[in-house]
Amino acid sequence: MALSNSQYESIMRVYNRTQLQKKHELDARVDEVYEKIPAVREMNDAIAAAAVKSAKELLAGDADAVNALEILRQELSSLRAEKEQILKKAGYPVDYMEMQYTCPDCKDTGYKDGIKCHCFRQREIDLLYAQSNIREVLERENFSHFSYDYFDDTKIDP
Protein backbone atom coordinates (compact mmCIF):
# COMPACT_ATOMS: atom_id res chain seq x y z
CA MET A 1 0.00 0.00 0.00
CA ALA A 2 1.39 3.39 -0.95
CA LEU A 3 1.75 6.09 1.65
CA SER A 4 -0.24 9.29 1.50
CA ASN A 5 1.68 12.57 1.47
CA SER A 6 0.95 13.21 5.15
CA GLN A 7 2.11 9.71 6.12
CA TYR A 8 5.31 10.11 4.12
CA GLU A 9 5.97 13.53 5.63
CA SER A 10 5.44 12.20 9.16
CA ILE A 11 8.06 9.51 8.56
CA MET A 12 10.47 12.05 7.08
CA ARG A 13 9.94 14.32 10.12
CA VAL A 14 11.08 11.43 12.31
CA TYR A 15 14.24 11.13 10.21
CA ASN A 16 14.84 14.89 10.42
CA ARG A 17 14.44 14.83 14.21
CA THR A 18 16.78 11.86 14.45
CA GLN A 19 19.42 13.58 12.32
CA LEU A 20 19.18 16.75 14.41
CA GLN A 21 19.41 14.81 17.66
CA LYS A 22 22.43 12.83 16.44
CA LYS A 23 24.12 16.07 15.33
CA HIS A 24 23.58 17.59 18.80
CA GLU A 25 24.99 14.45 20.41
CA LEU A 26 28.04 14.60 18.13
CA ASP A 27 28.60 18.28 18.95
CA ALA A 28 28.44 17.47 22.67
CA ARG A 29 30.96 14.63 22.28
CA VAL A 30 33.33 16.82 20.26
CA ASP A 31 33.08 19.64 22.81
CA GLU A 32 33.78 17.14 25.59
CA VAL A 33 36.91 15.83 23.84
CA TYR A 34 38.12 19.33 22.98
CA GLU A 35 37.72 20.35 26.61
CA LYS A 36 39.53 17.31 28.00
CA ILE A 37 42.15 16.93 25.25
CA PRO A 38 43.04 20.29 23.61
CA ALA A 39 45.61 18.53 21.38
CA VAL A 40 42.74 16.93 19.44
CA ARG A 41 41.36 20.35 18.52
CA GLU A 42 44.82 21.38 17.31
CA MET A 43 45.04 18.22 15.20
CA ASN A 44 41.62 18.79 13.67
CA ASP A 45 42.62 22.38 12.89
CA ALA A 46 45.86 21.13 11.30
CA ILE A 47 43.93 18.60 9.22
CA ALA A 48 41.52 21.29 8.02
CA ALA A 49 44.33 23.75 7.27
CA ALA A 50 46.29 21.18 5.27
CA ALA A 51 43.19 20.25 3.25
CA VAL A 52 42.41 23.90 2.49
CA LYS A 53 46.00 24.60 1.49
CA SER A 54 46.02 21.62 -0.88
CA ALA A 55 42.67 22.61 -2.38
CA LYS A 56 43.93 26.14 -3.04
CA GLU A 57 47.02 24.78 -4.78
CA LEU A 58 44.92 22.47 -6.94
CA LEU A 59 42.55 25.28 -7.89
CA ALA A 60 45.44 27.59 -8.69
CA GLY A 61 46.71 25.02 -11.19
CA ASP A 62 50.00 24.50 -9.41
CA ALA A 63 52.05 21.87 -11.28
CA ASP A 64 53.33 20.40 -8.03
CA ALA A 65 49.82 20.18 -6.60
CA VAL A 66 49.42 16.57 -7.70
CA ASN A 67 52.55 15.60 -5.78
CA ALA A 68 51.40 17.75 -2.90
CA LEU A 69 48.09 15.87 -2.91
CA GLU A 70 49.86 12.57 -2.21
CA ILE A 71 51.88 14.22 0.53
CA LEU A 72 48.64 15.63 1.95
CA ARG A 73 47.07 12.16 2.00
CA GLN A 74 50.03 10.78 3.90
CA GLU A 75 50.02 13.71 6.31
CA LEU A 76 46.27 13.38 6.94
CA SER A 77 46.62 9.65 7.49
CA SER A 78 49.39 10.28 9.99
CA LEU A 79 47.40 12.96 11.84
CA ARG A 80 44.29 10.72 11.98
CA ALA A 81 46.32 7.81 13.36
CA GLU A 82 47.87 10.09 15.97
CA LYS A 83 44.44 11.42 16.91
CA GLU A 84 43.10 7.88 17.27
CA GLN A 85 45.99 7.00 19.57
CA ILE A 86 45.33 10.05 21.74
CA LEU A 87 41.61 9.19 21.96
CA LYS A 88 42.38 5.56 22.88
CA LYS A 89 44.90 6.67 25.50
CA ALA A 90 42.25 8.97 27.03
CA GLY A 91 39.77 6.07 27.16
CA TYR A 92 37.55 7.10 24.26
CA PRO A 93 36.55 4.83 21.38
CA VAL A 94 38.22 5.65 18.06
CA ASP A 95 34.89 6.67 16.49
CA TYR A 96 33.81 8.83 19.43
CA MET A 97 34.06 12.03 17.39
CA GLU A 98 32.14 10.64 14.42
CA MET A 99 28.42 10.64 13.73
CA GLN A 100 26.65 7.68 15.35
CA TYR A 101 23.71 6.76 13.12
CA THR A 102 20.61 4.85 14.17
CA CYS A 103 20.73 3.15 10.77
CA PRO A 104 24.28 3.07 9.39
CA ASP A 105 23.01 1.75 6.05
CA CYS A 106 21.14 4.92 5.03
CA LYS A 107 22.78 7.24 7.59
CA ASP A 108 19.34 8.15 8.95
CA THR A 109 18.02 9.52 5.66
CA GLY A 110 15.61 6.67 4.87
CA TYR A 111 17.16 6.08 1.45
CA LYS A 112 20.19 4.15 0.30
CA ASP A 113 21.27 4.50 -3.32
CA GLY A 114 17.93 6.12 -4.17
CA ILE A 115 15.93 3.17 -2.81
CA LYS A 116 13.94 3.07 0.41
CA CYS A 117 16.07 1.63 3.19
CA HIS A 118 14.95 -1.32 5.31
CA CYS A 119 14.46 1.06 8.25
CA PHE A 120 12.14 3.25 6.15
CA ARG A 121 10.13 0.19 5.13
CA GLN A 122 9.86 -0.80 8.80
CA ARG A 123 8.64 2.70 9.70
CA GLU A 124 6.06 2.41 6.90
CA ILE A 125 4.84 -0.89 8.31
CA ASP A 126 4.71 0.48 11.86
CA LEU A 127 2.82 3.59 10.77
CA LEU A 128 0.26 1.72 8.69
CA TYR A 129 -0.14 -0.88 11.42
CA ALA A 130 -0.75 1.82 14.04
CA GLN A 131 -3.21 3.70 11.84
CA SER A 132 -5.19 0.55 11.05
CA ASN A 133 -6.17 0.17 14.73
CA ILE A 134 -5.34 -3.50 14.50
CA ARG A 135 -3.19 -3.35 17.65
CA GLU A 136 -6.26 -3.22 19.89
CA VAL A 137 -7.82 -6.17 18.10
CA LEU A 138 -4.63 -8.19 18.44
CA GLU A 139 -4.55 -7.58 22.19
CA ARG A 140 -7.81 -9.54 22.44
CA GLU A 141 -7.53 -11.90 19.52
CA ASN A 142 -4.25 -13.76 19.53
CA PHE A 143 -2.87 -17.19 20.29
CA SER A 144 -2.53 -16.52 24.00
CA HIS A 145 -6.35 -16.40 24.11
CA PHE A 146 -6.75 -19.47 21.90
CA SER A 147 -9.00 -22.17 23.36
CA TYR A 148 -9.62 -25.74 22.26
CA ASP A 149 -13.01 -25.63 23.99
CA TYR A 150 -14.66 -24.51 20.77
CA PHE A 151 -13.54 -27.57 18.85
CA ASP A 152 -15.13 -31.02 18.93
CA ASP A 153 -12.51 -33.53 19.91
CA THR A 154 -14.83 -36.54 19.65
CA LYS A 155 -15.42 -36.41 15.91
CA ILE A 156 -12.43 -37.21 13.75
CA ASP A 157 -12.55 -35.79 10.25
CA PRO A 158 -11.03 -38.29 7.78
Image (cartoon, rainbow, N blue to C red):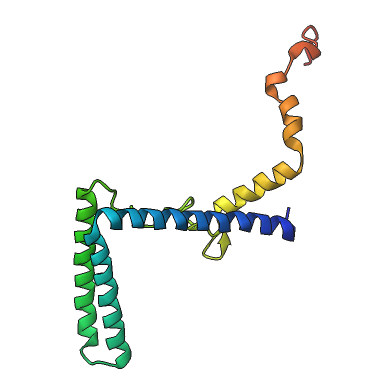
Residue located 71% across and 55% down the image: 7
Please give left or right for residue 71 compared with residue 17 in the image. Answer: left
The residue depicted at 21 percent of the width and 82 percent of the height is: 68
Residue 71 against residue 78 in the figure, above or below: below
Q: Residue at x 76, y 42 (%)?
A: 132
Q: Position of residue 71 (x, y in %)?
A: 19, 77
Q: Nearer the viewer, residue 34 or 74?
A: 34
Indicate the position of residue 63 as horizontal and vertical percent values: 23, 92
**Nearer to the camera, 33 or 87:** 33
Q: Position of residue 86 (x, y in %)?
A: 20, 54
Residue 19 against residue 140 in the figure, above or below: below
Extreme residue in the front direction: 35
Picture coordinates of residue 133, whole percent (x, y): 76, 39
Quadrant position of residue 140: top right
Q: Residue at x 72, y 19 (%)?
A: 145
Residue 139 relative to residue 89: left or right: right
Residue placed most toward the observer, 37 or 82: 37
Picture quadrant where residue 66 is located: bottom left
- Using the rendered image of the protein, determine whether residue 141 is visible from the camera's viewpoint: no
Q: Is residue 58 left or right of residue 39?
A: right
